[in-house]
Amino acid sequence: MVATHALDVAGRSGRLATPGVGGFTARMPVNARENASADAVERERVRDLELVATARDRAAFRRLFEYYGPRVKAYLRRLGSDDDAAEDLTQEVFVSIWRRAGQFDPNKASVGTWVFTIARNKRIDALRRDRAPALETDDPELEIDPAPRGDAVAELNRMSALVMRAVETLPEEQKRLLKIFYFEEKPHSAIAEELGLPLGTVKSRLRLALAKLRAALGEDRT
Amino acid sequence: MMNGLTLDELLLAHAAGTLPEPLALVVRTHLALSEEGRRRYRLYCALGGALLETLEPVALRADAWDRLDRAIDRVEPIRLPASIQHDPRVPAPLRAFAPEGFERLPWRNLGPAAEVELPLAAPGYRTRLIRLKGGKSIPRHTHKGHEVTVVVEGSFRDEQGVHRRGDLVIADGTVDHRPVADEDCLCLTVTDAPLKLTGPIGRLLNPLLRI
């Protein structure tokens, strides 16, 4: 599916409106305690991944596998792999995580986001495996950012937590729609049919959901 | 904008991993050159990560950990390659296609322009590098499908404005377009053929071909 998610936030030229300075600054009121506990969980995961990278620590790796493994499998099942294929591909994803742990940079992505991108790339590799090997899909797009500005680092640190919180506050139907876009490969018309909604409604709901996410990130200028 | 494919749609689909290869290459080249693009792309990756957490976990088999524990005995860590001597003009996603730089590619002369087709196995798409000399233009044309272009070097202008290094430009059938290079300009361009395709790949393409 090439999504024609009609976000319409970019102009015809496809260029984005100039973002505000510090696009990811949190301007949303947040519950400090909840935030602190989410931070603590994320810090543990980052520490586990660093233990994997620096000490080849299998206990730490097993903790990550036990948490993310069933989620990665769910992701792959949802995108159409049968149980055997999803189980095998999950193994490959985690072998890759074991090997690449040293490349993880907590200033650029949360552990969950990093795991998602590895699972996504593995899935693409698997789909392309039958064809001529073409592109190296593991190229680290999350890592090619040349040194972010100092103030950007802290913002990036918070981004994933903010996105997650924002996703939680979305109405169920918008959450469902986002999941379909990420976890099912379907043309928009099929999505609309599945939801029993007119195509225009599907598009406007997607647009609404993404606008809310951007607003949660303090990025409401588009 | 009935047919309006936007940069945000491309970035979101790329983050979700659902873009056909030629469009993924254009987006990756854009990301290599545009900090704003990377910023937006990271948001959509973070959204994927957040959504991953919302999925109902599916139990792994009982022996999954033992299997993984054995599998990692046999592998070495992957380190980022030490900085190899690259032509700095070639953005990372294009290096596989132009390992010795753009000059050495087999350019086909088209008068004011020159082009070289990149070998991507993607039915229904043409993926080309196009060069246009400063001050020259490509004759007016429209597109039956979409044309997605990223400026790799130099700049050009058309009815939509001026496009510089890293900019991603989307044109479709409603754009009547006559690009003029302001200075020597090199672009990566993907066009989709006006075909309705069926089958698994066709299903990927058809949303783009809604004309």
Image (tube, coloured by chain):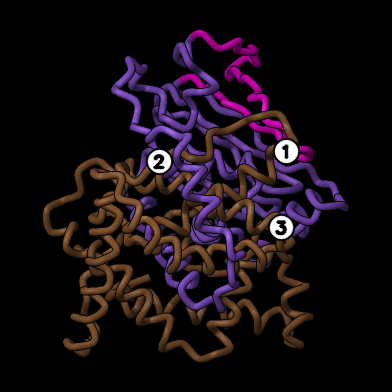
Percent coordinates x, y for residue A8 in the rendering: 52, 68
In the image, residue B69 lies in the stretch drawn in magenta = no
What residue is disc 2 on? A99
Q: Colour of chain A?
A: brown
Callout in the foreground (1, 3) = 3
Percent coordinates x, y for residue B141 in the rendering: 69, 38
What mark, if any, has residue B125 been given in the picture? 1
Disc 2 crowd, CA 10 A, few/some/many (<14, 14-19, 20+)? some
Q: Is the C-beta separation of discs 1 and 3 under 8 Å?
A: no
Q: Colour of chain B?
A: purple
- Report helix, strand or loop for mark 3: helix
Percent coordinates x, y for residue B137 in the rendering: 55, 27
Q: Nearer the viewer, residue B78 or A155?
A: B78
Q: Same subunit under labels 2 and 3? A: yes
- Report helix, strand or loop for mark 1: strand
What chain does badge 3 belong to? Answer: A
Disc 1 crowd, CA 10 A, few/some/many (<14, 14-19, 20+)? many
Per the rendered image, the range of residues in magenta is B104-133
Quarter holding residue A128: top right
Q: Residue at x 21, y 74 (%)?
A: A40
Percent coordinates x, y for residue B123 in the rendering: 78, 38
What chain does badge 2 belong to? Answer: A
Q: Nearer the viewer, residue A6 or B135?
A: A6
Locate residue A200 relative to residue B68 in the image: left or right: right
Callout in the foreground (2, 1) = 2
Residue B156 visible in the picture: no
What residue is disc 3 on? A84
Disc 3 crowd, CA 10 A, few/some/many (<14, 14-19, 20+)? few
Q: Amino acid at mark 3?
A: Asp
